[in-house]
Image (cartoon, rainbow, N blue to C red):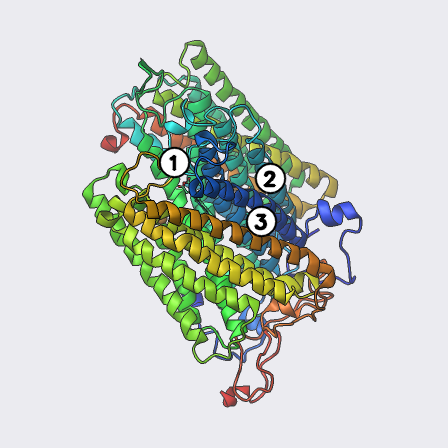
Amino acid sequence: MSIFRHISTKPWLLDERPANVIHPGLASRTSTTKSGLRLFLGVITALFALLSVAYIENTTLAYWTPLLEPQLLWLNTAVLVLSSLTIQRARNLAAKDLPVQARRLLITSAVLAVAFLFGQMFAWLELLQLGYFASVNASYAFYYLMTALHGLHIFGGITVLVFALDRAYREDNVDTIKRTVQLCATYWHYLLLIWVVLFAMMLMDNGSILDKI
Amino acid sequence: MVSTNIEDSELDSHGPQTFLTKYVWSQDHKVIAIQYMGTATAIGLVALVLSWFMRLQIGFPDTFDFIDSESYYQYVTMHGMIMVIYLLTAFFLGGFGNYLIPLMVGARDMVFPYLNMLSYWFYLLSVIILASSFFVPGGATGAGWTLYPPQSILEGTPGSDWGIILMLVSLIVFIIAFTMGGLNYVITVLQARTEGMTMMRLPLTIWGIFVATIMGLLAFPALFVGGVMMMFDKVLGTSFFIPAIVSMGESLEYGGGSPLLFQHLFWFFGHPEVYIVALPGFGIVSDLISVHARKNIFGYRQMVWAIVIIGALSFIVWAHHMYVSGMDPAFGFFFAITTLIIALPTAIKVYNWVLTLWRGNIHFTLPMLFAIAFVFTFVVGGLTGLFLGNVVVDVPLSDTYFVVAHFHMVMGVAPVLVVFGAIYHWYPKATGRMMNQTMGHIHFWVTFIGTYLIFFPMHFLGFVGIPRRYFTFDGLDFIPESALTLNAAISIAAFVVGAAQMVFLFNLFWSIRNGKKADGNPWRATSMEWQTPQTPPVHGNWGASLPVVHRWAYDYSLPGVEEDFVPQTIPVAEGEMDER
Ligand code: HEM
Ligand SMILES: [Cu+2]
């Protein structure tokens, strides 16, 4: 692996190769934002992984009662999947140098993501009307917590997308759009993955999940 | 503005021109660094004053009316939290990280300048929220910096309403700020290094900051999760962390939660946090020692590896803070072993510092004095850490002043000494002037000897069994009279040390105008930040074109070279190879 090659060099020895051969020192905006996003996804992973560990640990406690999932969650999941599909399509279109179509599909994805958020809120309302507040049981507490944190991340994604679209309009630059679409698509897919994992955990919550796997 | 390192600017100064964009809403890493340092210092002073209040009470009980048991707990809590997070973390990463990373890797700025600016403003917001908690009904939280539930959110603990809520909100905002900054630091080191600057040519300062930032990015989410969950418990009445409790004869609404879960989340963050402030310190000290001993750092590669290994190991030792919370003996055994293993890479670092000094051309400049003082202090704190890492030794010593002595030595005083050394070292780069020597020496000797007088005797207080976080020792008959006398003496030392910090602060401002003028490289150092065309560096750092790096950062006292240092920007001379 290159990391091991890196850290086993001996920098105190003189290296007479030209500097740009040793390290070219070229970083483009595209690669920095891409790595930035990857690192950020790493942080999110840590966040949701810790949350999941806490969740799984709680399902083993004596007071745990399984969550009564609102059926609406299935519909919401479908909407989120659709949003991911459209953004993937947008990415493909952008790669084929069709920025106008790509932009249209990006907007569709954003709208679908907003729909997902509203759907999640309706699911909350449904449970709240039935009297299942967060304080009823840890399973509900976790449900509200996890959907809220996930929703906030979706919301953040939409906000960034809107700003990026606005900029892409003004600059009217194919490369900007390409880059925007790529980054957003990665983020979208990842948040879909997180949602699927969270939802699956909530579905498997009677007794310890660990026993089930 | 795109500030990655490929752009070379044609203009000399293309930076923002108005006062507001230059110094307030600035996206320049140097200005943001100073903003971070200034804010951290301001809130750090609050923490210092709180420590005086605590020492007043402990040294001279029942003398001061304004300190009661409630306010004492608030002082302990706020002092601890501010010192660890809002002062040290912010100073090392937001302050030195921002100032030094672009300069030392040869970049024009951070890769995401706008995010970097946001990071500072979020940090400022978190500090303001924290400080405002002193003024809400019930006052700041008194739950201890560990914020253990259930007590932190239940009646009976000071500030269990607004105080704790504001503390949690402030922490959450801080974590957001840190994440925005952290993404910048990591990606800048990875991708914005200038031509010729390989990872292994980076100064150890950058390695320390780099690894510490990655650790922070992985560890802070644990505090975030714990904080949000506790917020739910407090505001929405959930019971994540609250078991069934009977309070004053009535059973509370809560029930079914696990207080231990919070402890795990907290220390999964809390232990790495110790190294988040230690690793940048390690890195900086390595560079200070090397520059001021005119010698290359001994075992550069080992130093890098040790930083990385310590960073990784520190994620699997957290439960050594929970020996007394009750755990399976097998777990206790595991965590004791991992804790002791961390001592190995740490010891290697200490040996390498000492070996760098050995037969070096030591200049007892202020940065060097602080660096050596750091090594002494850190070794003492580290050794007592080995005591506490063992379950059987920890159990009787836990929650005594032995622990207070240990962690102040290792993560309080030691990193603070590095901060001072680093400020004396880089001040001429940031301002173009040297700091005053006389005031610096007063500051150094009083601080170094004074902190020993404060914290060294606390080990003995711990052996006697004097408990930590106690407002009064009345009624504890086992405490001998002499311990109380000792406490009074410690308090006096604490006030003197505090006064010495005022000398430092005065020096900091006084020297901006009156310090001796410094040229661009007063310490004759090799690393990139000393090679900027202007001092202080202007916007864009490097003038028209980026520098090119030809060697590592430690070419001091080379045989056959006239000057005793060769900057990283100097190409390999013909025949230099044969000379070595
Ligand atoms: C002159 C300097 C300092 C003095 C006199 C001082 C004094 C104290 C005192 C009296 C306590 C409370 C002991 C108790 O009642 O249990 C305390 C706690 C603490 N201090 Fe310091 N301190 C100083 C600097 C620092 C620094 C630089 C740090 C940075 C890490 C720090 C971190 C802490 C922490 C984490 C606690 C524990 C708070 C808690 O128990 O919740 N202190 N300090
Ligand atoms: Cu620890």
User: Residue A180 lies in what quarter of the image?
Assistant: top right
Question: Is the shortest distance between ligand 1 and the CB of mark 3 under 8 Å?
Answer: no
Image quadrant where one finds the C terminus of chain A = top left
Badge 2, how many Cα within 10 Å: few under 14, some, many 20+? some
The label on residue B269 is none
Q: Chain of mark 3?
A: A
Kind of residue at badge 1: Thr
Instruction: Identify the secondary structure beneath mark 2.
Output: helix
User: Residue B423 lies in what quarter of the image?
Assistant: bottom right
User: What residue would you read off at disc 2?
Assistant: B122
Residue lying at 43% horizontally and 14% vertically, measured from the top left: A127
User: For the residues carrying marks 3 and 1, which lies nearer the camera in this image?
Assistant: 1
User: Residue A185 lies in what quarter of the image?
Assistant: top right
Residue lying at 35% horizontally and 16% vertically, measured from the top left: B252
Q: Position of residue B549 (x, y in %)?
A: 59, 72
Q: Is residue B188 above or below residue A152?
A: below
Q: Is residue B241 above or below residue B400?
A: above
Instruction: Report whether residue B106 is seen.
Output: no
Q: Position of residue B255 (x, y in %)?
A: 32, 20
Q: Nearer the viewer, residue B346 or B400?
A: B400
**From this viewpoint, which residue is outermost toward the left?**
B329
Q: Is residue B309 above or below residue A157?
A: below
The label on residue B472 is 1
